[in-house]
Image (cartoon, rainbow, N blue to C red):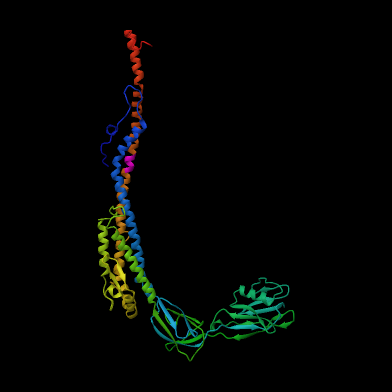
Amino acid sequence: MVRPESDDNQAMSNVGISFGSPTSGQGFDVSSTVSAMVANLQAIETPWKNQLTTLESQDTALTSIGTDLSSLSTALSSLTDVDGDFSQMEGSSSDPSVVDLTAANVGAVPGTYTVVVSQLAQAFSYLSSSISSTDTLSGSLSIGGQTITLSDGTATDASGNTIPQNDTLSTLAAYINAGDYGVTATVVAGSSGSELALLSDTSGASGAVTIDASDLTDSTTGSAVTFSQQQGGQDAEFSVDGVSMTNSSNTVSTGIPGVTMQLLEASPNESVQVEIAADTSQVESAVSSFVSAYNTVVGDLNTQEGDDSSGNPEPLYGNPNMAMMQEQLQEALTSGTASGTISSLSQLGITANDDGTLSLDSSTLDSALTNNYQDVVGYFQGENSFGLNLSTALTNLGNSGPDGLVYLALQQDSTEESGLNTNITNENTIISNDQTQLTTELNEANYTLQEIPSQIDEVDELYSAITGYNENPNG
């Protein structure tokens, strides 16, 4: 740093010292004099501080633009991502009481499918004979090969674990449900008392469970407790476009790729029409969000071309980075190869205004999505497409390192700010040392001035002593 001359003499030459008559002895105000001198010395920092303020204002504007560019990239990615809004589907069923659609996700292919449900899936179930809800049980119950041993006074399972004594149907059901027996137990009210219902946890033909209650007894009455099968397990049987299929449950996600159906009723003589279509409303919303985000960025750039509310130029007025951003954004709007019938944004209802912002005609967009959906997808996602080219442009302009335009501009400003702050810090150190030295020197000078009257008195006394002349005859 080259520091202009700023020694103490220069500081004093710019500061007047008022101490009245040199012989008055009143001296001068050292503190205010030093402060005035230091203010002169600090003037060297003013250009640095002004430049620092300018750079910080530019940083604020650049950061805001970078944030809005990032938001635009996010809005665009919902259209360029193959798993984004273009992949979202919706479906309907001609008879939702037989086949109901619960989801149409990524991978679903638009079209109309014919579904016939011949048989619903069901799980194995068993029901015990009726006993009183307060009766206790003894003996053993085997479920799927696992034996539960019950007895009055002592009760253990196959692993030797103790279970509640004097078991009733309710405590037995709770114990079964707490274990891993492959069934769910429920106590139901029968016509002659309580009954224990066992339902296989696995739906379909593969969910068969063997129940052996040959050694289970109602200890209160001495009667045997028996179980009877209420329904056998079976798979759902259905067809899609004439292709026969089975499924262990009535929730089917393999019949139509990307589509989850719920089979609700067996109706082998009815053909249910399932229609899968693109969710154009979600795409339209995504395109609208993209246009809005684009306009925000263009608004940021347009703002920097004028003055602020005080009539001063905006921080980035005349900055070449602003012109570069505008140029690259405008070029990206017309880039990309055609996708079928779609070759420009105007065919999607997106047109440019005089200020560079975009307008969206929803009816034109809706028509394009209805009649040329896949071409619209290709315009955003195909090789060398508009969507991918704009995405690349936004990456090059944004605040992501190492090559984003905003990122590089902020890095450059940061380097300059660091240098200016170093200069200011170093200058403050010099000024602090000067302030200390000035205070010492001026305190000494002030003391000398204040001593002049007493020194004059001493001279007068010496003169009188030598000459006999008394300047003060009344003294």
Query: Looking at the figure, which quarter contains the C terminus?
Result: top left
Q: Position of residue 226 (x, y in %)?
A: 67, 84
Above-or-below relation of 85 to 6: below
Query: Which residue of the protein is positioned furthest toward the right in this rendering?
Result: 221
Does the magenta-highlighted stretch encompass residue 277?
no
Q: Position of residue 143 (x, y in %)?
A: 62, 79
Above-or-below relation of 294 to 266: above
**The quadrant where residue 19 appears:** top left
* Along the viewing direction, whichever of 456 and 237 lies nearer the viewer: 456
The stretch of residues the image draws in magenta is 424-428
* Along the viewing direction, whichever of 295 and 382 lies nearer the viewer: 295
Can the viewer see residue 20? yes
Query: Looking at the figure, which quarter contains the N terminus?
Result: top left
* Along the viewing direction, whichever of 340 and 121 lies nearer the viewer: 340
**The quadrant where residue 287 appears:** bottom left
The mark tally for this picture is 0
Which residue is drawn at the image coordinates 32% and 63% (left, top)?
297
Q: Position of residue 405 (x, y in %)?
A: 29, 59
Query: Which residue of the protein is positioned furthest toward the bottom in this rendering?
Result: 269
**The quadrant where residue 68 appears:** bottom left
Can the viewer see residue 400? no
In the picture, measured across the screen, residue 367 lies left or right of residue 123, that is: left
Magenta portion: prevailing SS class: helix
Query: Which residue of the protein is positioned furthest toward the front in this rendering?
Result: 474
In the picture, measured across the screen, residue 27 lies left or right of residue 143, that is: left
Above-or-below relation of 54 to 270: above
Which residue is drawn at the image coordinates 34% and 24% (left, top)?
449
Q: Position of residue 194 (x, y in %)?
A: 68, 80
